[in-house]
Image (tube, helix red, strand yellow):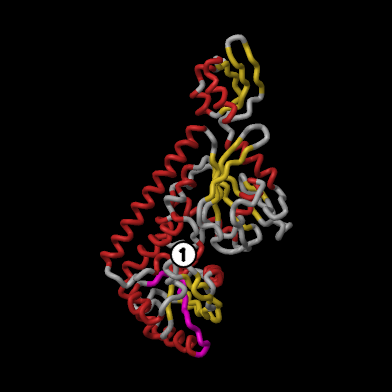
Amino acid sequence: MINIDENNNVIEREEYRAILVGVSTGEDIAYSMEELKNLASASGAETIGEMVQNVDRINSGTFIGTGKLEELAEMVKNMEADLVIFNDELSGMQIRNIEDAVGVRIIDRTMLILDIFAARATSREGRLQVELAQLQYRMPRLLGFGKSLSRLGGGIGTRGPGEKKLETDRRHIQRRMDDIKKEMEEIKANRSIQRARRQKSDIPVAALVGYTNAGKSSIMNILVKEKQVFEKDMLFATLDTASRLIELEDGKKFILVDTVGFVSKLPHALVNAFKATLEEVTEADLLIHVVDASFENHDFQIEVTEKVLKELGADGKESLLAFNKIDKVPEFSSFEKNAFNISAKSGQGMDELKKEIIAKLYSDFETVSLLIPYERGDLVSYINNQAKPLETKYEPNGTLLKVNLGSADRNRLKDYLI
């Protein structure tokens, strides 16, 4: 566990001993609990025990039943736990009541995910988005947090930009939220200008999407042919959207975007905060949905990703399905439409995926002939920058170019088509 001060400096390292608590109202939560354990580990907590309760309805005051609450308090005492993590979102009142009963810090799944994001965000925009999500989540829970923060100090669920004096009044927090939104609008405006330039240049865009730790950044680094994006076998290694221009030998080029990974029960506040960044997904010409083929329950991860894409309004976009990490499961095979079996580690299947990406992105491109007058040398330079001409001839009345162009450029240069 890494504690960070208000200036984002590491001030101490500490390992938390956590008990995980899940409640089922009829559904199977085994996978969700396993994922919670991985999230806890990613945040620096050691899971020393688990408790699952099956109920018909949630207890409004303590989330779990009174008998289970007494059992949890006994577990905390006997196992010397110093943290309890619930698999669902808790209200401020529930947090306060449970803490009063068990005597240690209580956090929920949303707080845990926000905590990981707070520790991993590196860019200005990423930090602003996380802080906004933390404030949006914690503001209605100030009553519960006030006692918790003053009694238990820092730790998991309190670090990062969102930990600054959360027990101050609501007006102060609302002002900070308004300030963050203004800053993010400025960043959004700058991104819109950059996107407009891309669209004007007719360079297609492909975006990598998928569950966290599916291998999106590794795939991007292979396609870019050099390690430019941070990659690691851990949850939420990538929080900041990265865009890279990929140029091919035949003159074709496209922009590849790497995005933050999704996870089940992704906090709504976080989805909203990251919508500005994830606009790259909604504006992309093609989505490459990366799936961890080695993970037994990968169908569930596909469903979660599709659900988040629907929330973003990107569910109807053309997409390819890339089952990654097949080096771990050589027997794996998929019969899904537009699916590819690949390994970013070994490179297996990457050439085929790349060819299909290009085919999809350039489906509206056509080979045309243009006769550009010599006085319009600016257009010849533009064409040479946009695409590698297949043929160039110098005629008496201008430069004759045979080139592969998209619909936008064909329309822009329609007066010179022959």
Q: Secondary structure at mark 1?
A: helix
The number of numbered discs placed on residues in the rendered structure image is: 1
Tell me: residue 23, above or below residue 360: below
Quadrant position of the C terminus in the picture: top right
Left or right: 267, with 418 as reference point:
left
Does residue 23 show up?
A: no
Q: What residue appears at the point 27 percent right and 67 percent down from the top-left corner?
A: 170
Image location of residue 135, percent across then percent down: 36, 64
From the image, tell me which residue sits under label 1.
118
Q: Position of residue 77 (x, y in %)?
A: 48, 89
Magenta-span inclusion, residue 329? no
- Judge by depth and name the residue closer to the eye, 335 or 160: 160
Q: Which residue sits at x=56%, y=77%?
A: 46
The quadrant in which residue 159 appears is bottom left
Q: Which residues are magenta?
A: 78-90
| Residue 9 location (% of width, % of height) | 48, 68
Quadrant in the picture for residue 245: top right
Q: Residue at x 65, y 42 (%)?
A: 354
Q: Position of residue 103 (x, y in %)?
A: 41, 85
Badge 1: how crowded within 10 Å, few (<14), some, or many (20+)?
Answer: many
Q: Quadrant of residue 99?
A: bottom left
Query: Quick check: can you spot residue 148?
Result: yes
Q: Amino acid at mark 1?
A: Ala
Q: From the viewer's perspective, is 291 left or right of 133?
A: right
Going by the image, does 101 lie left or right of 305? left
